[in-house]
C-alpha cells in the first residue's frame, strides 16, 4: 500500500507568509515521514480565508519533496487549456519525479460563478480542455474560439 498527502491550501492566518511556511513545513515533514506522494488542491472564490494557488505553491513545495510522485488537482473547466498545459508542463519539467495532474469538474457552483463560468458547461469544458492539453503536450498547436 502507498500513502500520500494532500496538503490544505487554505489557512486562516493574519500573516500570509505564515500560511505558506506551514505548507512548506508540512511538505518537508511528509517527506521525512516517508510518505509516497504529495498533492495540493484547487479552489477559487474562497471567501475570507487565505488560499494559496496550487501551481506556484507546488513549484515551491517540489524543492522540499525530492523525486517521489507529486501533483496538483485542477478544476479544469475553470482554466484556459493552453495556460493549464503550460503550467503543468513547467511543473513536470522542474520535478525530478513523476508529476500527476488530477483533473476534476468540481461540485461547488460558487467557484464557477466567481470565475464567470456557467457551471452547466463543466463536462464539455473538461473534455475540450483535456483534448487540447493532450494535443499541446504532443507538440501540436491548438486554436480556440
Image (cartoon, rainbow, N blue to C red):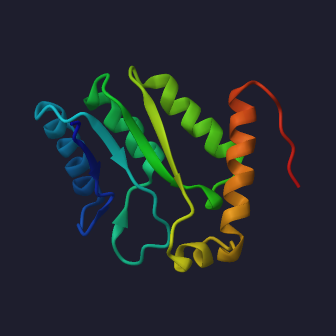
Residue drawn where x is 66% and y is 44% of the image: 83
Question: Which residue is more in the foreground, 140 or 19?
Answer: 140
What is the x, y in percent for residue 61? 32, 37
Q: Nearer the viewer, residue 29 or 56?
A: 29
Q: Position of residue 86 (x, y in %)?
A: 63, 36
Asked if residue 42 lies left or right of residue 126, the reply is left
**Residue at 46 percent of width and 24 percent of height:** 94
**Where is 108 relative to 19, above or below?**
below
Pinpoint residue 113: horizontal percent, then vertical percent: 61, 78
Quarter in which the C terminus is drawn? bottom right
| Residue at position x 18%, y 33% in the image | 31
Asked whether, in this view, residue 82 is left or right of residue 41, the answer is right
Q: Position of residue 47 (x, y in %)?
A: 41, 78
Q: Quadrant of residue 62?
A: top left
**Quarter occupied by residue 137:** top right
The image shows residue 144, relative to residue 15, as above or below, that is above
Amino acid at each position: 500500500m502507498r500513502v500520500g498527502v494532500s496538503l490544505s491550501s487554505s489557512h486562516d492566518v493574519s500573516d500570509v507568509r505564515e500560511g505558506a511556511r506551514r505548507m512548506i513545513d508540512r511538505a518537508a515533514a511528509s517527506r521525512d515521514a516517508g510518505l509516497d506522494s504529495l498533492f495540493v488542491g484547487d479552489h477559487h472564490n474562497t471567501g475570507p480565508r487565505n488560499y494559496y494557488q496550487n501551481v506556484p505553491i507546488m513549484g515551491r513545495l517540489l524543492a522540499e519533496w525530492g523525486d517521489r510522485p507529486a501533483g496538483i488537482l485542477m478544476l479544469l473547466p475553470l482554466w484556459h487549456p493552453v495556460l493549464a498545459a503550460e503550467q503543468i508542463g513547467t511543473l513536470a519539467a522542474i520535478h525530478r519525479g513523476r508529476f500527476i495532474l488530477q483533473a476534476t469538474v468540481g461540485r461547488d457552483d460558487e467557484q464557477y460563478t466567481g470565475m464567470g463560468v456557467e457551471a452547466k458547461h463543466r463536462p464539455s469544458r473538461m473534455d475540450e480542455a483535456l483534448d487540447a492539453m493532450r494535443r499541446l503536450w504532443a507538440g501540436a498547436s491548438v486554436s480556440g474560439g
